[in-house]
Amino acid sequence: MSRAISLSKLTIRLHWLIAVGMIGSLAFGIYLDEFAASANKGSLIGLHKSVGVIVLLLALVRLINTAKQGLPTPISESAAWQLSAAKVTHILLLAGTLFMPISGVMMSVGGGYPVGVFGLPLIPAGEENEMLSQIGHTMHGVGANIMIAAVLLHVAGAVKHSLIDKDGTMARMLGKQIGNS
């Protein structure tokens, strides 16, 4: 049974831009953890922060868009637990796209470092606040693990829809018209 409704171009574009930004930031953040402190690492962290701020701005637009349109309607029938898992995963992903950049900003500001986007200053360096830095650091680390798990669940769901259900969910996320409304 097909209950497909098309997704807006904005929804699709935001999904893929944020996905690339978040997955890239998660992978890059793991990579940065292996670096020893250096001027080169500082430059790379600046790049990581820049992408994080852009993801945050896109996520805010997506949150407003999702509030207006709601979460995507499932295309095919699924078990209640699968629908619940999908909904929780979508909510975790949406929350994480806000939570991760905000916790990164907390870490930077708490550490006395500036926050900017590709050299454009947004928050100047200030005094260190050890508690804010530590809270941000803990939230960022825990949040990264939650986001990795949520991304893996989301990808597993997409693979299931494509290979097992063959219901057109991936086609819809690529902007193709499918099914009957």
Image: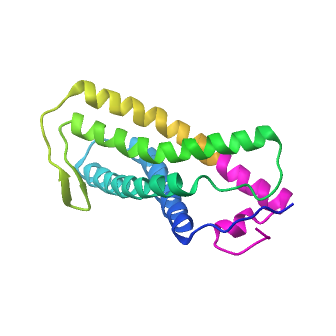
Q: In the rendering, at what x and y percent does residue 93 appear?
A: 55, 46
Q: In the rendering, at what x and y percent does residue 58 appear?
A: 41, 59
Q: Which residue is painted at 75% across and 72% down in the image?
A: 178
Q: Is residue 133 visible?
A: yes
Task: Point out the image quarter for the C terminus.
Answer: bottom right
Q: Nearer the viewer, residue 108 or 154?
A: 154
> Does residue 20 sit above or below 56 in this rendering?
below
Q: Which residue is painted at 41% across and 32% down in the image?
A: 139
Q: In the rendering, at what x and y percent does residue 38 appear?
A: 25, 46
Q: Quadrant of residue 170?
A: bottom right
The stretch in magenta equals: 153-181
Q: Which residue is painted at 26% across and 40% down in the image?
A: 108
Name the residue furthest bottom: 177
> Does residue 99 sit above or below 24 in this rendering?
above
Q: In the rendering, at what x and y percent does residue 81 appear?
A: 78, 37
Name the residue furthest top: 131
Q: Quadrant of residue 11?
A: bottom right
Answer whether residue 83 is magenta in the image. no
